Amino acid sequence: MEHSLAAKIIAAAPFIATSLFYSAAPELTRILKEKIRALLQSSDAMTRREESTAPSEEDVAPPALNPRYIEDYLEYTVDAAQVLPTLALPILAMFFALSQGLGSLELSIMLAIGVPVLVLLYVRILLADPVNYAGRKYFKRYSLLPLITMVLNGCAGVAVLILV
């Protein structure tokens, strides 16, 4: 059964929208890092004014309170918190496409491939060291979750437009 282009576009829209949303993830993380960095700097400056002395070796913060470490941990936390929506949206989009009467076999195959990949990705993120996770960038911009999400949803959107 041939479906109209409008029905295909409507069914593909959630996948394409997700890819576009995740393409902005590095920029949103950068904004959060800047806010945290400014907060840490202002807090450090206020502490020094109150003490009105230069920090001694004893006053140096432990590595876990290093601003760079905190920024990496923030990026890891943002990605880890996005895993549930990352899993839920493609599943909901598949059900939406099925409710539109679009190719159940093709969509079921995409779901059977996409969900295990995302679950494995979730486990990988939860087991990763935050600093190592945040330090690994693809295309000098994306951490693992936004990249995989953009690719999977982009491919699913194109597949819905072409195959169904």
Image (spheres, rainbow, N blue to C red):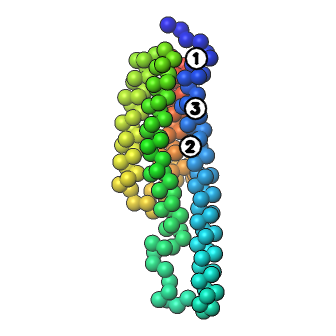
Vertical comparison of 150 with 50: above or below: above
Residue 37: x and y in percent read 60, 68
The type of residue carrying mark 2 is Tyr
Categorize mark 3 by other alpha carbons within 10 Å: few (<14), some (14-19), many (20+): many
The type of residue carrying mark 3 is Ile
Quick one: label 2 or label 1, which is nearer the N terminus?
Answer: 1
Residue occupying the point 50% across, 40% down: 149
Quick one: label 3 or label 1, which is nearer the N terminus?
Answer: 1
Residue occupying the point 44% across, 31% down: 91
Q: Please say whether residue 152 is visible from this viewpoint.
A: no
Residue 164: x and y in percent read 50, 16
* Residue carrying label 3: 16
Q: CA distance from mark 2 to mark 1?
A: 24 Å
Residue 74: x and y in percent read 51, 60
Q: Are marks 2 and 1 in contact (CB under 8 Å)?
A: no
Residue 112: x and y in percent read 37, 29
Vertical comparison of 29 with 91: above or below: below
* Residue carrying label 1: 7
Helix, strand or loop for disc 2 = helix
Tag nearer the camera, 3 or 1 = 1
* Residue carrying label 2: 22
Residue occupying the point 56% across, 25% down: 12
Q: Please say whether residue 29 is visible from this viewpoint.
A: yes
Quick one: label 3 or label 2, which is nearer the N terminus?
Answer: 3
